[in-house]
Amino acid sequence: MGLAGDIVIIVMAALLGGLIAQALRQPLILGYILAGIAVGPYTGGITVSDLHNIEKLAEIGVALLLFALGLEFSFRELKPVRAIALFGTPVQIILTMLYGFGIGHLLGWSWTSSVWFGALISLSSTMVMIKTLEKQGMMGTLSSRVMIGVLIVQDLAVVPMLIILPQLSNVQNGLSILLWAAIKAAVFLLAMILIGTKIIPRLMQYIANWNSRELFLITTTAIGLGIGYGTYIFGLSFAFGAFVAGILLSESDYGYQALSDIVPLRDVFSLLFFTSIGMLLDINYLLQNWKMILQLVLLVMLGKALILAVLSRSFGYRNVIPLAMGLGLSQVGEFSFILGRVGVGTKSVSAEFYTMVLTMTIVTMFLTPFISGLTTPLYAFARRWIKPLQLEPLYFPKSGLKDHIVIAGGGRVGISVANVLRKMDIPFVVLEYNSRRVDEIKECGFPIIFGDAGRRIILDAADLQKARLLLITTPVAVISLGIIDHAQRIKPDIHIIARAEGVEEMRALYQKGVTYVVQPEFEASLEIVNQTLLNLGIPAEQLKALTEDARQELNRPLSI
């Protein structure tokens, strides 16, 4: 069956690898990489016949990932991190290249190989990091925004690298080529602004009027991949073009629907990308050279972690962010594969050198979820034993918080509660990870910490140990249970009031030790009954008694 058979093999292997990863509570990407190793050309058994075509399909996965990232991208949301993204990232790339050159020099490599090595390790993996952040529930946090901002600029830096590095023997010619590439990029961006403001909105409106989800999906995909392919023909990065297309489409009224439609397609092709990475790993080479590979992995990941942590600290980021940056972006990225292939093709580096870097890169990618997952426990250790760290929340009293209320969730319910508490001069702090809601809360002037309340770091930052009460406003029981679990570890006797969607959710929350559970639909029904009976002339005192009896009847069997 050729390519079709290869895809079937990959999907089945990825399913098995994903199930194993899920059972071990690990990110699915690790399962996909292991699946790729299992069906790759170096392990025997069931093997994919045409790795080259799979790699081509995997490139679509990279493009779709960046397309989806562009759809989620907001210049307004990136504004707080633009300094480190636009100015810090070039510094990070230069420092990492110098560090990599130093490693190569110490190992006795030629100066060209050392420069190439520095360039290859300067890039981190957008694919791996986004998937890891999603698995950890960290998307939307300030840490994730900083990391994604840096990753985007790193990906853009691939374009001049692809031009300059092969021209190391002829610098003058390389600079002229780079200048021409910059001109082409400027022309492309101007054309995209025109297309994005004039053509794409009208096209999407026309397609939407047909009320065909299938046609809408095809149009969305065609815009992302079509513009990406246009940039490729133009001499720029395919993935870069897809990212720009996503940004353009996100500015239209159809961005959210486009994102929801493209995510399943993105995930399928991402599967091909990660399995293709696994297939590239030569186990025999790894076993024969494991000492050298381990040495390089340790040197690269430790060096990058230190550079990124210090860099983020120098740009004013405190607390968990430098640690998250260092541990999260210490791997080598997928664009290093592309850059390395160019090096081999132009005979700038040897095939053996490429194999070494490729093997090291795969190992760093594989380790990333584990290393990034150390952020929370290491930060907790630092808070307890090294130095008392505090987030810098907005509008906090100078004296700090004590005997306050922690509101987990800054949606409509959370804001309503906060309004009442402020009027009564009761101290409180809101925890919210949705950046748009954060902006709304900031406009209200409420004490706010940007972060996921389901993370212990965030609860510690809210001084939950000193709080009187925890309010959980989310209706999703799974999220609430996660928050409760961390909260009870921090302060076992904390009183918790939570919200629930239905009776089963109420039961689960009460069994977890929640003080009181509010069921909005039930409360709405009581209010409707109250208003009905008031209009019938029933005394208010009698109504109050009836309401309290109804609440006790609902909650009594659940709280036992």
Image (tube, rainbow, N blue to C red):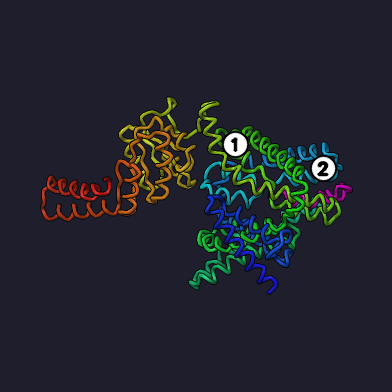
Relative to 376, does residue 507 appear above or below in the rendering?
below
> Is residue 277 found inside the magenta-colored segment of the image?
no
Q: Between 227 and 547, which is closer to the camera in this rendering?
A: 547
Badge 1 is on which residue? 323
Q: Which of the image's four quarters has the C terminus?
A: top left
Give x and y (percent) for residue 76: 55, 47
Q: Which residue occupies 68% across, 59% down? A: 276
Residue 539 x/y as whole percent: 11, 48
Give the magenta-colored segment's residue range: 152-175
Q: Residue furthest front?
A: 45
* Element on which disc 2 rests: helix
> In this rendering, does residue 438 appear at all?
no
The amino acid type found where label 1 is placed reads Leu
For mark 2, what is the residue?
114
Q: Badge 2, how many Cα within 10 Å: few under 14, some, many 20+?
A: many
Classify residue 296 as left or right of residue 528.
right
Where does residue 88 sit, x and y in percent of width and height?
67, 39
Front one among 151 and 478:
478
Contact, mark 1 vs mark 2 (Cβ under 8 Å) = no
Query: Looking at the image, is mark 1 or mark 2 earlier in the sequence?
Result: 2
The front one of 66 and 380 is 380
Q: Give left or right: position of 469 versus 178.
A: left
Q: Which residue is located at x 74 percent, y 45 percent?
A: 290
Q: Is residue 163 magenta?
A: yes
